Image (tube, rainbow, N blue to C red):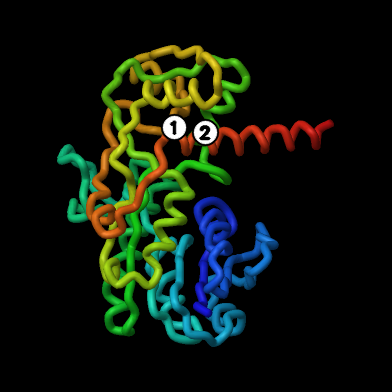
Amino acid sequence: MKNVLILGGSYFAGRVFVEELVKESDCDIFVFNRGHVPLNMAGVTEIVGDRRNEAEIVKGMPLLDWHAVIDFCGESDADLAKMLEFLPGKIDHYIYISTTSIYENTTNLPVNEDAPKLSAPQLELGPLAADYAFNKWLCERKLQFECPRRGIAYTCLRPVIIYGPYNYAPRETYFFDLISNNEPVIVPDNDLPLFNFLYVVDLAKIIQECIGNRDVFNQAFNVCSEQLVSYQGLMDVFEKVCSKKISIRKLSVPEIEKRQIPLPFPLDSHLVYSGTKLQRLLGFEYTSVEDGMKATYDYYRLVQDAKRNIRG
């Protein structure tokens, strides 16, 4: 049996990955996190500990040959350094879930893996978000340096905007709430912005295809389909999946900013990336935004129904 260790794995993308991985019969699955949201899944060994505490890594982890370590929650190069240094046993393949946010702003689109990376924190994003993307890039750099000298293969996956079940970020659910409450949805009057989206189940399946795959060793990849969506295109998708006519109000970008309307995507610039490099290697068939959002909306309705039942 192959031993697979998931770091994180209890919230959004990590949780969906574990759910997909348990369907495989050739893996012993271990999940290491702080235990705030237990999975309680058959076939999954949950280990509670803090990855920033080397003593908890050493004492909590079994001494095993790790076919793969999947890291969903590495937030600093120190996080990765400690795991590489203190995890008992031998690591064959370290897969780090990074982000396309590591790239500098550019008008050279679509953005591929060789595009310039951030050289400093993004202070304009405020204290809570300023360090996030830059630290993700530093984590990648740490893997690039440490893994070869330790005889470990690494892969960095850079997903675009992820949506789907368990998403705790107010992205698609922001719109679902408005639509469900029959409230108007405000979007920019500028149809310019285009985005890539990634269905969380697709990310989970892609990670599975990467595990132990020599074709992806010691490389970094954007993870996205070629399908592009605008705000208006997203409204069209929502009308289909919700089977409901949406009241749409278009406002100028300055007016949206003045009113502090919390739209979850950029208002006047593209977020377009190239996933060609990984697509050529895996030949993966991505879920369309229409199908992915339908499954996501169905899950949203289940959650809302459960909340209403609890309230009585």
Question: Residue at image x 51%, y 72%?
Answer: 5
Question: Are the two marked residues, 2 and 1, in contact with CB atoms closer than 8 angstroms?
Answer: yes
Question: Residue at image x 34%, y 41%?
Answer: 124
The image shows a total of numbered marks equal to 2
Quadrant of image for the C terminus:
top right
Q: Position of residue 184 (x, y in %)?
A: 52, 14
Q: Which SS class for mark 1?
A: helix
Rendered image quadrant of residue 256: top left
Query: Can residue 121 be seen from the camera position used here?
Result: no
Residue position for label 2: 294
**Residue 54 horizontal side relative to residue 136, left or right:** right
Q: Residues within 10 Å of mark 1 (few under 14, many from 20)?
A: some
User: Please, what is the three-letter code of the amino acid marked with disc 1?
Assistant: Glu
Q: Position of residue 194 (x, y in %)?
A: 30, 31
Residues 114 and 228: in front is 228
Rendered image quadrant of residue 48: bottom right
Query: Can residue 236 be seen from the camera position used here?
Result: yes
Residue position for label 1: 290
Is residue 97 shown above or below 80? Answer: above
Rendered image quadrant of residue 147: bottom left
Q: Position of residue 97 (x, y in %)?
A: 40, 59
**Residue 3 horizontal side relative to residue 126, left or right:** right
Residues 127 and 60: in front is 60
Q: Position of residue 88 (x, y in %)?
A: 50, 85
Question: Residue at image x 55%, y 28%?
Answer: 176
- Whole-angstrom CA distance, mark 2 to mark 1, is 6 Å
User: Please, what is the three-letter code of the amino acid marked with disc 2?
Assistant: Lys
